[in-house]
Amino acid sequence: MTPRGDPDAQERRRRPPAHPALRLTLDTPVTYLKGVGPARATLLAKLGISMAGDLLRHVPHRYEDATTVTRIVDAAVGSDVTVLGQVIAKGVLPTRKGLRVFQAVIQDASGMIEVAWPGQPFLDRTIAKGDWLLCTGAVRFFHGRRLQPREFVNLGPEEEGTAGGRVLAVYPSTEGLSVRLLRGLVQQHLDALLPLVSEPLPVDLLAEADVPPLRDALRMVHRPDSVVEAVRGRSRLAFEELLCVQILHRRANQVARQARGGRRFVNRRDLTTKLRAALPFQLTHAQVRAIREIVADMASPRRMHRLLQGDVGAGKTVVALFSALLAMENGAQVALMAPTELLAEQHARSIGTMLAPLGITPVLLTGRLAAKDKRAALTRLASHEPVLAIGTHALLQDDVSFADLGLVIIDEQHRFGVEQRATLGNKGEAPDVLLMSATPIPRSLALTLYGDLDVSVLDERPPGRQPITTVVRPESGRGKVFEFANTQLDAGRQVYVVYPLIETSEKIELKAATTMYEALLAGPLAGRRVALLHGRLPSDTRDDIMRQFRDGALDVLVATTVIEVGIDVGNASVMIIEHPERFGLSQLHQLRGRVGRGAAQSYCILLGDVGAEAAERLAMFASTEDGFEIARADLQLRGMGDLFGAKQHGLPAFRIADPLRDEALNETARQVADRLLQEDPGLEAPAHQALRQLLTVGYARALDLFRVG
Ligand code: ADP
Ligand code: MG
């Protein structure tokens, strides 16, 4: 782990040890290691390796053994394989389309195969004849067998292979530093370095998590006897990372509980009781529980910082409303921010209806307000009236100031950046904060992602909602699908037809949707009132179209994914999704959530010819409406980066762990962290010194959280 916070370690790094030749330590700069000169040290630094200990922590990201590597002779057309072969010929060839293709022929003991990288002529510079390449990809037929690698690793010359049951460790490398060279360096120094490694985790804790001691784990990952062993070694390293992050978060939460000066709202049960009486429905158990958690936070002297997660349609708005009323009955003001104007308007309308019996009218603040209305809104916010302001980013503007902002609610919180959320928070004096998210994720993961937030979960659907019928239909069924859509339209319902973002080109996306829009108008939807909605339209035009659809002035909305968030049209009963295989499951779930909002039976139709793998995913999606299950499957398929902009969320950086794929390990880490901090909040016990040291060296934040004395 690279020290970030520890000034001593930084100092040690700047100053080479007096007698490097005499004593090797984990802090010895790599330049002093045999086989590393200044040039290589620079390359190693690119990989985050500057000290001998970093070399130990640079672990293989992949292993190959005889069971995972296919003999070249057995690489059949149509299969997906990993092969290991030596380059015996190579060159760059132009194709008729003007694309330049780098091609190589690789050979192992069994035979040879052509490997091609279209559009990557530059590989000719880095791949040499005689190099061993580990290539993974599909084998196609193209004047013979041809492998097009999805992924490949240049192992350099003199590859030893995986023959004889050996496990081949593949390290993350960088240009100029081959995998073979890295592996050689690690192997060369491993025996000298391992004895220097001391155990930072208490023994009982290792047993609790069922992971091997650090020294064993490092040997297992660098020099495994089997892939199974390597995986076990890795689990230890991953666990350590997850544990550190969980400890920091839990500790930060603990410290905040003591220090965060917030406002103490008194549960007067004045407005909230009135709301409960006025609601046309019973709250679900989950809603009651979430409200209770929120009220407890708001009534305590500390500042609330809570995430409310719940599937689409779980009823987050009402929960938010209870918290708003609690603030207001204490004389404070509330701001509810949503990511789109339409969503803000929708909230203003539905909340306005719910609050009408209480004689409360929310203040709407969006970019499209006329100057006069905006002035009026600003005046109300600046007065000491306990208002509920509902708006978009417009709330963040400098000229918006609140007399007494006591609570901030942010809907679809992942649509906002950290700064934006902070800007709104800064418009009051340490207001309580409630974030809302419709992408439900496992609790331990939420705690990892959202740091010191508290989490409430709505894991129950309001009763009486009709399940949505989801089906997958092939292209050949297109005629029938639109026939069905027409029967729904004849019955007075409305329909969405959604196109994916194709490739990353907006132009192509637009063309696909436009072409389809025209084809639909000329064909199955002739005579219907249809509009085309896509991201290239100016946002007010977009909002206008959405409003028309909402008001029933349009029958069909042909759209790209811009409708994903923020439209609630109870009368829409059919969602047709084209090229469904191009969407992530969570995205499909959000799209599906646009129908089934009224009393009518609703349908989600996934239309298109998809491959076997996609068919399986889509079948899983069609079989459940449980957002948690879907989000989890999606996260596992795509990783977290896609679902959560990593930067935006300040995701902790993991070198080895993946809090999602390692969910079970992460859950264990959370439990262990909780127990540990309960027993020894400051990690002051002698048995915890090494762990505390590990934290303070690895994480700058730990210095504040675990101050000595
Ligand atoms: P989301 O969690 O997606 O934001 P909303 O808050 O928009 O969900 O609620 C979806 C719909 O469910 C709204 O029309 C709301 O009035 C309704 N609703 C919320 N809670 C209940 C409940 N307990 N019983 C019945 N309907 C409810
Ligand atoms: Mg909502």
Image: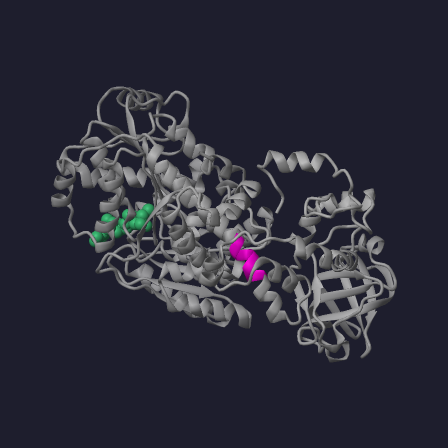
| Image coords of residue 238 (percent x, y) | 55, 56
Q: Is residue 513 visible?
A: no
Q: Is residue 86 visible?
A: yes
Quadrant of the rendered structure where residue 384 is? Answer: top left
Quadrant showing the C terminus: top left
Q: Is residue 167 left or right of residue 460?
A: right
Most foreground residue, 150 or 12: 12
Q: Is residue 461 left or right of residue 169?
A: left
Q: In the image, what residue occupies the spot 51% across and 48% down?
A: 691
| Image coords of residue 651 (percent x, y) | 51, 45
Q: In the image, what residue occupies the spot 43% across and 58% down?
A: 668
Counting the numbered discs, the total is 0
Q: In the image, what residue occupies the spot 70% across and 73% down?
A: 69
Q: Is residue 170 left or right of residue 598?
A: right
| Image coords of residue 443 (percent x, y) | 38, 54
Most foreground residue, 59 or 469: 59
Q: In the image, what residue occupies the spot 46% across and 67% down?
A: 618
Residue 239, magenta (yes or no):
yes
Q: How is the image coloured?
A: one colour
Quadrant of the rendered structure where residue 137 is? Answer: bottom right
Residue 17, magenta (yes or no):
no
Q: Is residue 125 left or right of residue 317?
A: right
Q: Which residues are magenta?
A: 234-240
| Image coords of residue 393 (percent x, y) | 41, 32
